[in-house]
Image: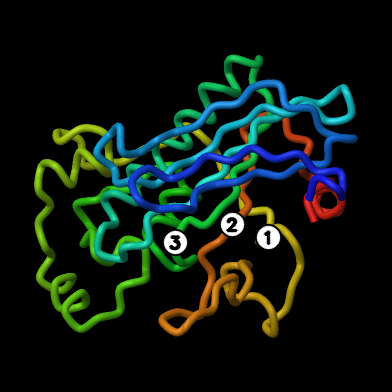
Amino acid sequence: MKNKGYECSFKGRTGDAKDGCATFWKSERLRLLEEDSIDFSEFSLRNNVAQVLVFELNGTQKFVLGNIHVLFNPKRGDIKMGQIRMLLERANALAGKWDGIPIVLAGDFNSTPESAIYKFLSTMKLNVSLHDRRQLSGLDSSEFGLYCSLLNCEWSDEEVRNATGSSNVMVARHPLKLSSSYAMLKGNSSNRGHHGEPLATSYHKRFLGTVDYLWYASNHVCIFFYTYTMWLSLFV
């Protein structure tokens, strides 16, 4: 990648895992101004990580880029929610530090477009008491998971705290008015679902569907209404 003109920032997962999050960018167009990361193990949210970076595009426009690989475990929607919530809060804080610059969030959110977690991202809030944590991401299709959902499984204080940030608060909230870049683009039934997202971004023996997204915060003055082609040229 370096030979192709890219620079890279990598944040490895903690524990025995060898993977993590990596962000690559074209050095001739983007300059890294600030770099931050989140080690979720410090908050008892497993050993996943996220990156939050500030870039300057062509010496003028600054923006925040968040990159995350959310926990896979379908039954731990509370932890997925906590990881995503913390990324959004950190990205918003960093954007504020730089006078409210635009925000882009990318990564594997390990949640389907039909899921409650997707609703949380797109609507800024979610009442977790109305959902079973095993069903939050839309990835658990097991008979036990469906049966448990029908029984309206209760949340423990720890699970609520993971999801919302407080064991006394049942509604998780985040500060960003997010829109999906993929859903903003025209498609058809051969490559898009009813929600506008791609039919699939991940395919392996246990799953075929969409879990990867590119969000932008439309409550910031945003450069991304014209940037689909730009993003392809910058990062692909």
Mark 1 lies on residue: 182
227 sits to left or right of 105: right
User: Which residue carries the number 3 mark?
Assistant: 110
Whichever of callouts 2 and 3 sits on the residue coming sooner in the sequence is 3
Query: For numbered disc 3, what is the local secondary structure?
Result: loop
Q: Is residue 23 left or right of residue 205?
A: right
Nearer mark to the viewer, of 2 and 1: 2
Which residue, given by chain and number where applicable, does mark 2 sit on? Answer: 213
Q: In the rendered view, would you say 177 is above or below 70?
A: above
Tag 2: amino acid: Tyr
Mark 3 Cα shell of 10 Å, populated few (<14), some (14-19), many (≥20): many
Q: Mark 2 and 1 residues: CB-CB less than 8 Å, in contact?
A: yes
Judge left or right: residue 53 versus residue 203.
right
x and y percent of residue 193 in the render? 59, 75
> At 64% across and 22% down in the image, what residue appears?
34
Amino acid type assigned to the residue bearing label 1 in the image: Tyr
Q: Which mark is residue 89?
A: none
